[in-house]
Image (cartoon, rainbow, N blue to C red):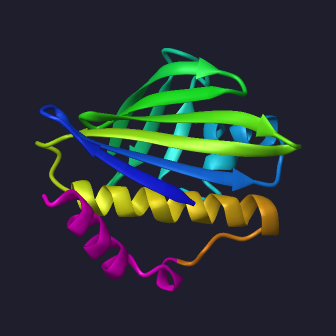
Amino acid sequence: MVVNYIKNDKGVYQTIEILINEQPSTVFNYLTTTKGIQQWFPQLYVENRSEHGNLYFHIENDQDLKMDILQFDEPKTFEFTWDTGTVRFQLAEKHNQTILTLKEYLPYEFPHIIIDFSGWQYQMESLKKLIEQGEIIEQSEFDFESNQQEIKGKLRL
């Protein structure tokens, strides 16, 4: 997994690139269907799987944060709002594998940038393990504290 960060006057950007041993169409379904996404990110569900459709983040106490699907180009691109930011998945085929790239933008006003970036890094590794080995990475197996310290050091927020 390759991770890069960029800061500018608007906010912070995280790019994660990971190689998955599966076809883009299969990976795309794990990203864009409720059945697929809930296997690796159970708080999310999809309604109207298309551009101008919606993705929801179930928080707690029956509260759901509605996110708009901004781009849906099967099996290449899936972009949606993420609170005040955006998340974009791009998929490319390479030798019967998928190069999956996540591009996330968060404005400086977003309250938990480092935690969110760390969470997406965990989710990408977990998604890869699910697709290739049939199981996710348990949260207890991912060192969030060290990961967040590393992100904090690189971003200097």
Q: Residue furthest top?
A: 52
Residue 129 in the image, given as x and y percentages of width and height:
70, 66
As rendered, which of 3 and 82 lies closer to the eye? Answer: 3
Q: Is residue 42 visible?
A: no
As rendered, which of 57 and 109 lies closer to the eye? Answer: 109
Residue 30 within the segment the image draws in magenta: no
Relative horizontal placement of residue 82, taking residue 111 as reference (left or right): right
Up/down of 89 relative to 16, above or below:
above
Q: Quadrant of the C terminus?
A: bottom left
Residue 156 in the image, given as x and y percentages of width and height:
15, 61
Up/down of 141 relative to 109, above or below:
below
Residue 147 within the segment the image draws in magenta: yes
Residue drawn at the location 60% of the way across and 26% of the way down: 77
Magenta-drawn stretch, dominant element (helix, strand or loop)? helix
Quadrant location of residue 30?
top right
Q: Residue furthest right?
A: 96
Residue 125 in the image, given as x and y percentages of width and height:
59, 64
Residue 34 in the image, given as x and y percentages of width and height:
63, 42
Magenta region, residue range: 139-157
